Image (cartoon, grey):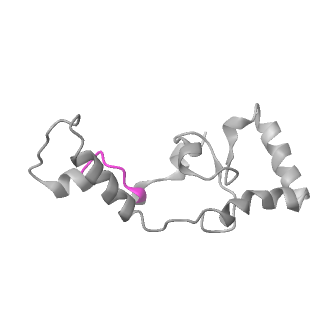
Amino acid sequence: MQYSVVPIVYGGADYQRIAPPWSYIDTRDFSSHKDLAEYLKRLDAIPHEYNEYFRWKESYRVNTNPMPHAMCKLCEMLNDPLQPAKSYYNMHEWFNGSGVCNRSSFNWKKYRP
């Protein structure tokens, strides 16, 4: 998001919740691959339409430091009386252990149809 490219996304997240409007192209918004390809060709041919995907930068900024939000979320969860009490013997294993998402192991080749 911090670079001048338009992400083309496919599933896996609620993009409307986490990204500004008109900041990405969701492939699920098209009825076919052909419709998507035609739309991308149109954007390539009409620069002012392509540039609309960057207008969000006038009103939003990219937060490259997620820690402030993470700390707020942690505080919110710790103080939520509806959350069950939990304790962890090994915080490092809980945070970095198996089954925890790790970007460095993400492999795009695995997920291509």
At x 65% / y 55%, what residue is drawn? Answer: 7
> x, y (%) of residue 73?
33, 52
Q: Residue furthest top?
A: 31
Give the main secondary structure of the magenta stretch.
Answer: loop
Question: Is residue 97 found left or right of 85 in the rendered image?
Answer: right
Residue 3, image quadrant: bottom right
**Total number of numbered discs in the rendering:** 0
Q: Which residues are magenta?
A: 97-103
20 vs 104, nearest the viewer: 20
At x 14% / y 42%, what residue is drawn? Answer: 86
> x, y (%) of residue 79?
22, 46
> x, y (%) of residue 104?
41, 60
Q: Determine if the magenta segment contains residue 99.
A: yes
56 vs 87, nearest the viewer: 56
Question: Is residue 103 found left or right of 22 in the rendered image?
Answer: left
109 vs 97, nearest the viewer: 97
Quadrant for the N terminus in the image: bottom right
100 vs 29, nearest the viewer: 29
